[in-house]
């Protein structure tokens, strides 16, 4: 049986494999201004329940899973329309802008819902809190394929960075840091230290030179 992984880890892995590894291997969790704002954005959507607006049932914090893909998690909102169709909506910080990791996370939610209900889900949306606008995402064959490929890679990655046959793997499996401007917005920035630990950093070069023979 495939190990079940959280849907949110897929987003982390696509955004930054090192971030995902620090969570899987070391169990690191941290908070910053952005995570606190994210909690506020999700405050209403994280309350399980439902409401009806203009004939559409809004299912909040709906648990979803897929045995085939080995995923579980929850959808912020799933709109159930009068014709029975389902439309997942994911809440995100920031202005209306496309991010591949967010689209893949939403697509993975749809794949879980399709397996659970047998209902085809052609599209969903991401609600961007800062601009208060929704961006519709079509679950094209290409997006579905890339999402499933990322899920398979995540499972392989999780095995190499977590436990195998009950034995915890070493830190050597954690990918090296690759500093980019977005790193400073990451809640694990002070733990990851990408400027100091990146492959091309001065500290890394000195460490390599030290052990040269």
Image (spheres, rainbow, N blue to C red):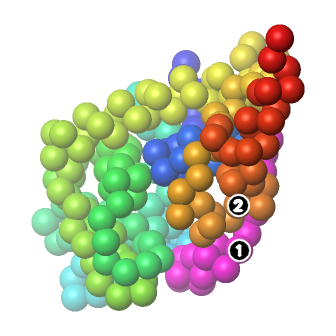
Q: Do the residues bearing badges 2 and 1 touch, measured as CB atoms within 8 Å? A: yes
- Residue 44 can be seen, yes or no: yes
Image location (x, y in percent) of residue 37: 60, 82
Q: At x 24% / y 44%, what residue is drawn?
A: 143
Is residue 40 one of those drawn in magenta? yes
Earlier sequence position, callout 2 versus callout 1: 1
**From the viewer's perspective, is residue 117 above or below residue 95?**
above
Q: Quadrant of residue 102?
A: bottom left
Question: Which residue was labeled with disc 2?
Answer: 189
Q: Label 1 neighbourhood size at 10 Å, few (<14), some (14-19), many (20+)?
A: few
Q: At x 22% / y 61%, what residue is drawn?
A: 137
Give left or right: position of 166 versus 158. Answer: right
Question: Which residue was labeled with disc 1?
Answer: 32
Is residue 37 one of those drawn in magenta? yes
Image location (x, y in percent) of residue 65: 47, 43
Closer to the camera: disc 2 or disc 1?
Answer: 2
Looking at the rendered image, the quarter that the N terminus falls into is top right
- Residue sitting nearer the eye, 116 or 22: 22
- Residue 109 can be seen, yes or no: no
Magenta stretch?
Answer: 23-44
Give left or right: position of 86 versus 206. Answer: left
Q: Secondary structure at mark 1?
A: loop
């Amino acid at each position: 049986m495939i190990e079940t992984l959280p849907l949110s880890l897929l987003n982390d892995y696509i955004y930054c494999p090192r971030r995902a590894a620090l969570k899987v291997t070391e169990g690191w969790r941290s908070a910053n201004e952005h995570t606190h704002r994210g909690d506020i954005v999700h405050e209403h959507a994280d309350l399980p329940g439902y409401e009806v607006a203009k004939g559409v049932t809004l299912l909040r914090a709906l648990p979803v899973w897929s045995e085939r893909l080995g995923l579980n998690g929850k959808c912020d909102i799933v709109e159930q329309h009068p014709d029975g169709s389902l439309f997942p909506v994911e809440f995100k910080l920031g202005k209306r802008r496309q991010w591949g990791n967010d689209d893949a996370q939403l697509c993975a939610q749809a794949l879980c819902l399709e397996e659970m209900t047998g209902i085809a889900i052609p599209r969903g949306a991401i609600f961007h809190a800062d601009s208060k606008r929704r961006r519709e995402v079509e679950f094209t064959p290409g997006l579905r394929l890339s999402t499933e490929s990322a899920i398979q890679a995540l499972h392989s990655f999780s095995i190499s960075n977590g436990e195998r046959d009950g034995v915890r793997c070493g830190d050597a499996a954690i990918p090296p840091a690759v500093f980019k401007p977005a790193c400073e917005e990451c809640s694990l920035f002070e733990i990851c230290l990408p400027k100091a630990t990146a492959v091309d950093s001065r500290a890394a070069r000195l460490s390599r030179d030290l052990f040269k023979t």
